[in-house]
Image (tube, rainbow, N blue to C red):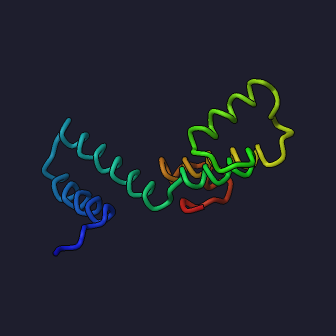
């Protein structure tokens, strides 16, 4: 029985295929190939860094429970709207900053603010 190929291996194979095709493409097709390469790079970083797990852990530190991420987000938004949580809530601002940084590191690791904050793409 053959082993299942890991998602990152499949992503890398498609990225290499697109890189080989790129010199032969022009105009719209070249643009779409570049968009596909960028999308695959984002997916690979998301698989490697798992920013949603990081967000869930950070929000659990603020909300005090480990509910599913969607529930934590909804609860946090409701408490912010109601004024029961805010800038003075211990750990909230730091947690939200870390969530934003983790998302930026996946979406665009070359984002200038990551460098300004002294963060790497794997922070």
Tell me the residue at 13%/51% (across/down).
24
Q: Quadrant of residue 86?
A: top right
Tell me the residue at 30%/43% (across/down).
35
Residue farthest along the left direction in this orientation:
24
Residue farthest along the bottom direction in this orientation:
1
* Residue 25 x, y percent position in the rendering: 15, 46
User: Which quadrant: the N terminus?
Assistant: bottom left
* Residue 20 x, y percent position in the rendering: 18, 59
Q: Could you say which is closer to the camera, residue 11 or residue 3?
A: 3
Q: Could you say which is closer to the camera, residue 21 or residue 84?
A: 84
Q: Quadrant of residue 96?
A: top right
Q: Is residue 26 positioned above or below 9 on the image?
A: above
Judge from the rendering whether residue 19 lies leftward or rightward of residue 87; answer left or right: left
Judge from the rendering whether residue 110 lies leftward or rightward of residue 33; answer left or right: right
Tell me the residue at 23%/45% (across/down).
33
* Residue 46 x, y percent position in the rendering: 45, 54
Judge from the rendering whether residue 36 lies leftward or rightward of residue 68; answer left or right: left
* Residue 43 x, y percent position in the rendering: 38, 52
User: Which quadrant: the C terminus?
Assistant: bottom right
Q: Could you say which is closer to the camera, residue 60 or residue 21?
A: 60
């Amino acid at each position: 029985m053959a082993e299942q190929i890991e998602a990152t291996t499949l992503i890398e194979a498609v990225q290499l295929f697109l890189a080989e095709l790129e010199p032969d493409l022009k105009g719209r097709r070249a643009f779409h190939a570049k968009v596909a390469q960028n999308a695959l790079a984002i997916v690979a970083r998301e698989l490697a860094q798992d920013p949603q797990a990081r967000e869930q852990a950070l929000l659990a530190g603020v909300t005090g429970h480990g509910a599913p991420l969607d529930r934590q987000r909804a609860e946090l938004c409701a408490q912010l709207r109601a004024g029961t949580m805010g800038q003075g809530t211990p750990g909230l601002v730091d947690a939200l900053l870390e969530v934003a940084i983790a998302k930026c590191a996946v979406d665009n690791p070359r984002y200038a603010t990551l460098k300004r904050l002294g963060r790497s793409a794997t922070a």
